[in-house]
Image: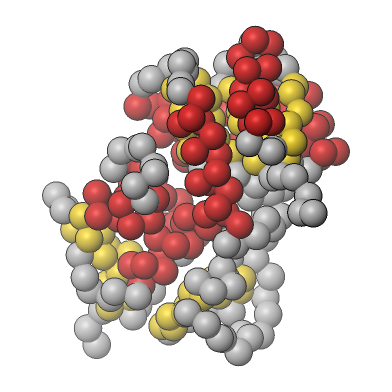
């Protein structure tokens, strides 16, 4: 029998946390509840969850800081939970590395669907610790990949080799990068990218795409032969530069 996937629930409202645990336990997940940020960071290291449901408004260390600390060590999926609905809160959460964002109160079926969708997407790439790039020889590539000068993006084994170094990135960042790079010079609207990468199960807005492009550009700088280009008023493209 396969081991149950573990969900760490971080919420200072005991009633909400217990309700979430009940929903997920019925779907055969193993859950653990903690009530503040310090407990969350400790439980993450000791329990090694497959996904974290993280409330933003916590006593002591808030959810944003917990997300920062987790992202220093791991790319484990994080779904942020908040009673706040402002775009700023959502964008900040995504920029810090959250994979999804839900506004309270939420429907139990939607919560379970979001958890399953994030885990399904993430399982394609496996959970790897966040790390600094390490200089290495470029391995022989197999499967689905694209190759350009000083860049290889492999969607089969979820790897990016940039100037001979392995660049760690969350699955959705890699999927977005691969999709654009596999259609060079083709312009995609934000809603097209949102639909293709996040799928119909994702209830988000096109600002999500902008956030992920920003994070990609922080890791992958423009190259003399190619770059991630913004097409103002429309969307983005992977541009091959003319010689």
Residue 230 in view, yes or no = no
Give the x, y percent position of residue 90.
42, 30
Q: Residue at x 38, y 26 (%)?
A: 88
Which quadrant is home to the C terminus?
A: bottom left
Q: Is residue 14 above or below residue 206?
A: above
State whether residue 36 is above or below residue 207. Answer: above
Looking at the image, residue 178 lies above or below residue 242: above
Residue 105 location (% of width, % of height): 46, 16
Q: Is residue 88 visible?
A: yes
The structure residue drawn at horizontal position 65% and vertical position 47%, both measured from the top left corner, is 76
Tell me where residue 53 appears, x and y as whole percent.
Answer: 61, 31
Q: Quadrant of the N terminus?
A: bottom right
Q: Residue at x 36, y 51 (%)?
A: 199
Q: Is residue 137 left or right of residue 145?
A: right
Of all residues shown, which one is farthest toward the left?
Answer: 233
Compare residues 93 and 35 and report the one nearer the observer. 35
């Amino acid at each position: 029998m396969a081991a149950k996937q573990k969900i760490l629930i971080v919420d200072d409202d005991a009633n909400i946390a217990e309700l979430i645990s009940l929903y997920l336990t019925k779907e055969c997940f193993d859950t653990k509840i903690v009530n503040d940020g310090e407990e969350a960071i400790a439980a993450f290291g000791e329990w090694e969850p497959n996904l974290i449901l993280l409330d933003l408004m916590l006593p002591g260390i808030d959810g944003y800081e917990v997300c920062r600390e987790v992202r220093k060590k791991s790319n484990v999926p994080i779904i942020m939970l908040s009673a706040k609905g402002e775009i700023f809160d959502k964008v900040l959460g995504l920029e810090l590395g959250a994979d999804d964002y839900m506004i309270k109160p939420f429907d139990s079926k939607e919560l379970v669907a979001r958890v399953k969708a994030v885990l399904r997407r993430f399982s394609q790439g496996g959970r790897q610790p966040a790390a600094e790039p390490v200089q290495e020889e470029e391995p022989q590539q197999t499967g689905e990949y694209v190759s350009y000068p000083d860049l290889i993006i492999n969607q089969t084994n979820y790897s990016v080799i940039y100037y001979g170094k392995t660049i760690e990135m969350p699955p959705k960042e890699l999927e977005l990068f691969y999709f654009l790079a596999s259609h060079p010079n083709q312009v995609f609207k934000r809603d097209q990218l949102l639909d293709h990468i996040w799928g119909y199960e994702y209830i988000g807005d096109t600002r999500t795409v902008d956030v992920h492009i920003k994070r990609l550009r922080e890791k992958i700088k423009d190259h003399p032969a190619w770059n991630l280009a913004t097409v103002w008023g429309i969307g983005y493209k992977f541009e091959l530069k003319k010689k």
